[in-house]
Amino acid sequence: MTAIYKRELKSYMTSMIGYLFIFFILVLTGVYFSAYQLSAAYPKFEYTLSALTFVFLIGVPILTMRVLAEERKQKTDQLLLTAPVSVGEIVMGKYLALVTVYAIPVLIMCMYPLLMSKFGEVSFTSSYTAILGFFLLGCANLAIGVFISSITESQVIAAVLTFVILFAFFMMNGISSFFSESSLSTCVTFGLLILAVAIILYTMIKNVMISAIVGVIGEIILIVIYVINSSFFEGGIQKVLEIFNLSGHFENFTNSILDINGIIYFISVIVVCMFLTVQSISKRRWN
């Protein structure tokens, strides 16, 4: 894993991609720092970090699009898969290289509260709590980008899909507001989702009976729950969509709260994405 980590880190540090990513984050950090802290004299660095969350929509797709897609396109992934290391070590080596590149601008950000303290009173606890949350948010976004890169051999497709998914997560509050919180509408929506799952299952296994059984059982369970306790579905769509609201879990960090649930959430996102990436590569390995 160490050899793969060093190889990936060297590839980012000897090309423009890594430097462009670092430059992009630091330039925007400087712009918002100038606007909030220097011009408006806000003593809270958290405002700058809160405004910076959109940088992942552009930076992450560019940084992660080649991490696995390029290996697959150039067939060099076959060399990695035959190396005396596990698929998990390959994935972790590449992911940790990305995290290292991302950690560089984050470490530089740690200097900003120190600079601010020279000109006034600054809450270091609040500032560094927000920086921790910002780092975890970025790591979660990178994990999503790595997974998307593992399911295609086209860097362009990987970048576009990563942008679309991250943008959907970024706009999750707005998306959830389009859905009604009533029990009936939520139940109908879940029913359509069960139907979609049954259709997807059919496209994967080409077995009508099994797909139909899964769909019928799911719909029956849904109806039974609605008849017994319809209030169970109230606001159900919003609760499900909240799971994918990455930026929403970052808000507590910007409010000077060391959110343990948020830390666990970001770590869970990373673990799930790494697991899915390993499974995606392992499936291709055995095929």
Image (cartoon, rainbow, N blue to C red):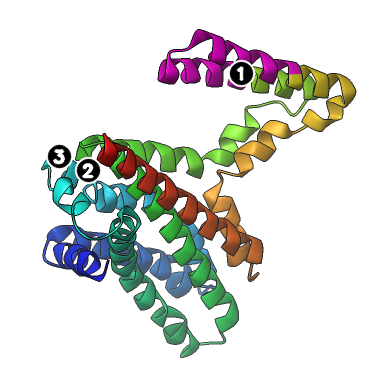
Q: Residue 122: give x, y in percent of width and height.
A: 56, 83
Residue lying at the far top of the rendered structure: 208
Q: Amino acid at mark 1?
A: Val
Q: Does the CB distance between marks 2 and 3 fall below 8 Å?
A: yes
Residue at image location 46% in from the left, 55% down from the top: 270
In magenta stretch: residue 210: yes
Quarter of the C terminus within the rendering: top left
The answer to which image quadrant residue 158 occupies is top left
- Magenta segment's dominant SS is helix
The residue to which callout 2 is attached is: 69
Disc 2 is placed on an element classified as helix
Residue at image location 19% in from the left, 53% down from the top: 80
The residue to which callout 3 is attached is: 73
Q: Nearer the viewer, residue 218 or 63?
A: 218
Q: Which residues are magenta?
A: 192-220
The residue to which callout 1 is attached is: 214
